Image (spheres, rainbow, N blue to C red):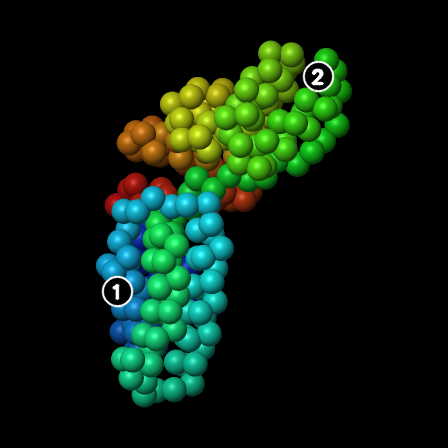
Amino acid sequence: MDNFFESIQDYLDGALSPEEHQRFERELERNEPLLLETDHQRMLREVLGKQVAAAPMIPLLRNTLKEVSDRHFGSVRKKKKITVVQWLAPLAAAAVILVVVNFMGWFAADYDALPPMTSSVTRGAVDDSAVSQATEAYNAGDYLQSIGLFRQLMAADPTVARYPYYLGLSYIGNEDYQRAIEQLQAVADGKSVFAEDACYFTAVALWKLGKDKEALVYMRKVTEASEYYRKAEKLRNKLDN
């Protein structure tokens, strides 16, 4: 089991498939360091709470805690005997960082993490400067501005599939999931290069609205060729359980 941190998080999230869940629990029975680390992570979840909303700096803090956990876990492999205070100290230190800055929501899986938009030259009626402005606003997380800009771009050239796609993602960033679905479904049901990615984010938006059955329909359209396949599988397992 190479990636202890992600495997533990998936286990505690209930995001493993039944086969993966059984395999993980068999590993717990024979792997004392893994059992200790799983207990540590479960304890931190209980202390910090899972219900606090995630904030923009969460990925950085998650990586910080992962690095601390990896270093600690590596030392645990080399030492059979370790006291409670010893194994708790490094994780508690990371937990204090999270509490102080009030970023306790990192435990939620980042299913709705948005991809950056790359710049590209357009051909047709749309000015490249307008595309650049929309790209800059979107990548900066200024979703209200990018929403307005992408709507203007769509009005000027409705044939470009990336405009409704990134408009839909902007709505997700703005937590307006119903409007996100309206934009993304059309892309997901089409044949553009964005179709499969749009399937994933359509499913995420539906899930956010509590429409799990509809979300599963689009989640199952995400194939192994997609960079979102693993996330789609994790969320599908979560919804199926």
The residue where tag 1 is placed is 43
Q: Secondary structure at mark 2?
A: loop
Q: Please give the name of the residue rendered at 34% of the width and 87% of the height, measured from the top-left corner.
A: 80
In the image, residue 135 lies at what x, y percent?
63, 31
Q: Nearer the viewer, residue 226 or 127?
A: 127
Q: Amino acid at mark 2?
A: Val
In the image, residue 59 lies at what x, y percent?
47, 52
* Extreme residue toward the front, this view: 100
Where the N terminus falls, by quadrant?
Answer: bottom left
- The reply to whether residue 143 is visible in this rendering is yes
Query: Quadrant of residue 179 in the image?
Result: top left
Q: Please give the name of the residue rendered at 51% of the width and 39% of the height, measured from the top-left corner.
A: 114
Q: Amino acid at mark 1?
A: Met
Q: Nearer the viewer, residue 103 or 112?
A: 103
**Crowding near the residue tagged with mark 2, few <14, some 14–19, many ≥20 C-alpha atoms within 10 Å:** some
Q: Secondary structure at mark 1?
A: helix
Q: Is residue 227 left or right of residue 136?
A: left
Q: Is residue 225 left or right of residue 207?
A: right
Q: Please give the name of the residue rendered at 46% of the width and 45% of the height, measured from the top-left corner.
A: 56
In the image, residue 81 lies at what x, y percent?
32, 88
In the image, residue 149 lies at what x, y percent?
59, 21
Among numbered discs 1 and 2, the one appearing first in the sequence: 1
